[in-house]
Image (cartoon, grey):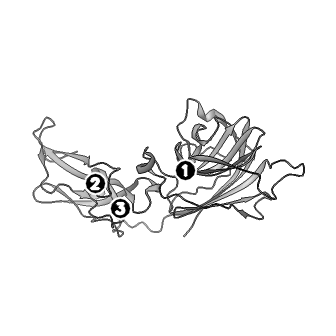
Amino acid sequence: MKRGDYWYMTTAVGGTAGPPTGHMVIMARSKSLAGPWENCPRNPLIRTISAREKWWSRGHATLFEGPGGKYWMMYHGYENGYWTLGRQTLLEPVKWDADGWPRPLGGDLSRPIKKPRDIGPQPHGAPLSDDFSTDKMGTQWAFYDPANEEANRLKRVGGTLHMAAKGKTPSDCAPLCALVGDQAYRVIVDIEADPGAEGGILLFYNRRLYAGLGFGSKGIVMHRYGLQRPRGAIPGQRDPGGSAVSKLSIRLTNDRNILTIHTSDDGRQTWRKFDVQMEVSGYHHNVAYDFLSLRPALYAAGQGEVRFRNFTYEALT
């Protein structure tokens, strides 16, 4: 950016995926884009000093002028203990010193700072429950690693999301993911699978790392560490003909990286707790790369289609 006689170049160094204290923001300035460039004597301008801080790996900053001529830096960081939420956006005010260099004023951002302008109470977050009556692709939902024309697998009819099956497991079927930002939340969805298809709901990082539950004509499949573990039919959950159920409601509760699963075959009237809980704090970039976050995801694998209804999202305190 240019301010006065100088061009200011902001650079990220140290590596986002290293130790919490490794990433940082440095700056140089020059009166010409061709140089010579002068390094700021206070570099690094922003960094995480201690792993005890709330925000880790702070870096990749953008310096900009906001309303009223005030300057700010916007950048990202990982929340301490929640690499699973991915890189989150941080904002702090900046002042210009007499020597012509900017000085960030936010400290370690462990406590809230004053808002630039008070415009009264505002709604927090976005509603994430979905009755599938409208298309929320790109605003709430996105396929993981989509092929060309991936969206053609979907259609919405009467409050039901129809998803054509693809691949054999969540790793190769391009699950449909929803971005969330809460440390604790609960998601529920009603699922109906064709014979030959397997459908379910996951906490999905990438094709190498995910956890959750699915089902199909061969019964229940538990997913953990990105591996599939067939479990057969759930006791008491069979149709009158004796075959595995084709309809099931699945509830995932992610309570600060502890995953608990419940199922219901009577329209969410009664819930049966699945016999395995999972700890998912390691499902993140430093384990499986890709700079993503751990997201609720719907998947349809095998042959035929899987139908999803009444996706319900609830943030927990």
Q: Can residue 140 be seen in the rendering of this structure?
A: no
- Rendering coords of residue 204 (x, y %): 55, 49
Identify the residue shown where x is 34% and y is 59%: 56
Determine contact: label 1, label 2, CB under 8 Å: no
Estimate how packed mark 1 is, as few (under 14), some (14 to 19) or many (20 or more) residues with alpha carbons within 10 Å: some
Q: Which mark is residue 225?
A: 1
Q: Earlier in the sequence, mark 3 or mark 2?
A: 2
Of the image marks 3 and 1, the number of the one nearer the N terminus: 3
Q: Residue at x 17, y 54 (%)?
A: 43
Q: Quadrant of residue 235?
A: bottom right
**CA–CA distance in space, label 1 to label 2:** 27 Å
Q: Looking at the image, is 155 positioned above or below residue 309?
A: above
Neighbourhood count class around disc 3 (C-alpha, 10 Å): few under 14, some 14–19, many 20 upward: many
Could you tell me how far apart the alpha carbons at marks 3 and 1 are, in whole angstroms? 26 Å
Snapshot quadrant of residue 302: top right
- Residue visible at 26% across and 49% down in the picture: 14
Q: Which residue is mark 3?
A: 55
Residue underneath mark 2? 22
Residue nearest the viewer, comparing 284 with 149:
284
Q: Mark 1 belongs to which amino acid?
A: Tyr
Of residue 111 and residue 18, the one placed in the foreground of this image is 18
Q: Amino acid at mark 3?
A: Trp
Q: Nearer the viewer, residue 264 or 99?
A: 264
x%, y% of residue 95?
21, 60
Q: Residue reaching furthest right? A: 241
Q: Is residue 73 visible?
A: yes
User: Would you say the residues marked 3 and 2 are in contact, meaning their CB atoms lie under 8 Å apart?
Assistant: no
- At mark 3, the secondary structure is strand
Q: Which amino acid, mark 2?
A: Gly
Image coordinates for residue 2, horizontal then vertical, percent:
20, 45
Q: Nearer the viewer, mark 3 or mark 2?
A: 2
How packed is label 2: few (under 14 Cα within 10 Å), some, or many (20 or more)?
some
